[in-house]
Image: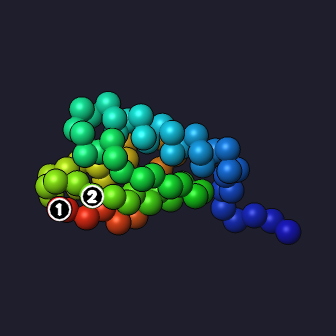
Amino acid sequence: MQSTGLMLTEADDRDLERRITVFLADRHVPGLRQLEVAATNGTVVLRGRVRSFYEKQLCQNVCRRVAGVVHVVDAVDVA
């Protein structure tokens, strides 16, 4: 049986989550540090709450810049 896509291990997913979390924290925007990040095979799900639409857009754009991210699912609320 041939695989048609790249399958990452759980360790790869955890490493991607860690790298995204660090990258978000480096933006020096407190709300981004509180977001929950989950990754599965390059698909990243962001959950949590930020204070503005700008912060919501920023977290999506930051995540897309991290190597290994294929798709970003935005489940972030603006409070």
In the visual, does 41 lie left or right of 7?
left
Query: Residue 12's quadrant in the figure?
Result: top right
Q: Residue at x 29, y 49 (%)?
A: 59
Q: Position of residue 33 (x, y in %)?
A: 33, 41
Q: Position of residue 77 (x, y in %)?
A: 25, 64
Toward the bottom, the furthest residue is: 1
Q: Which residue type does callout 2 highlight? A: Arg
Distance from disc 1 to disc 2, alpha carbons, whole Å, reads 6 Å
Q: Residue at x 67, y 44 (%)?
A: 11
Q: Nearer the viewer, residue 2 or 56?
A: 56
Q: Which residue is mark 1?
A: 79
Give the mark nearest the N terminus, 1 or 2: 2
Question: Around disc 2, counting alpha carbons within 10 Å, would you say few (fewer than 14), some (14 to 19), or many (20 or more)?
Answer: some
- The answer to whether residue 57 is above or below residue 25 is below
- The answer to whether residue 2 is above or below residue 66 is below
Question: Around disc 1, counting alpha carbons within 10 Å, would you say few (fewer than 14), some (14 to 19), or many (20 or more)?
Answer: few
Q: Residue at x 42, y 40 (%)?
A: 21
Q: Which quarter of the figure is the N terminus placed in?
A: bottom right
Q: Secondary structure at mark 2?
A: strand
Query: Residue 71's quadrant in the figure?
Result: bottom left
Toward the right, the furthest residue is: 1
Q: Secondary structure at mark 1?
A: loop
Residue 55 in sight: yes
Q: Which residue is mark 2?
A: 49
Q: Mark 1 and 2 residues: CB-CB less than 8 Å, in contact?
A: yes
State how the image is colored.
rainbow
In the visual, does 32 lie left or right of 36?
left
Q: Which residue type does callout 1 highlight? A: Ala
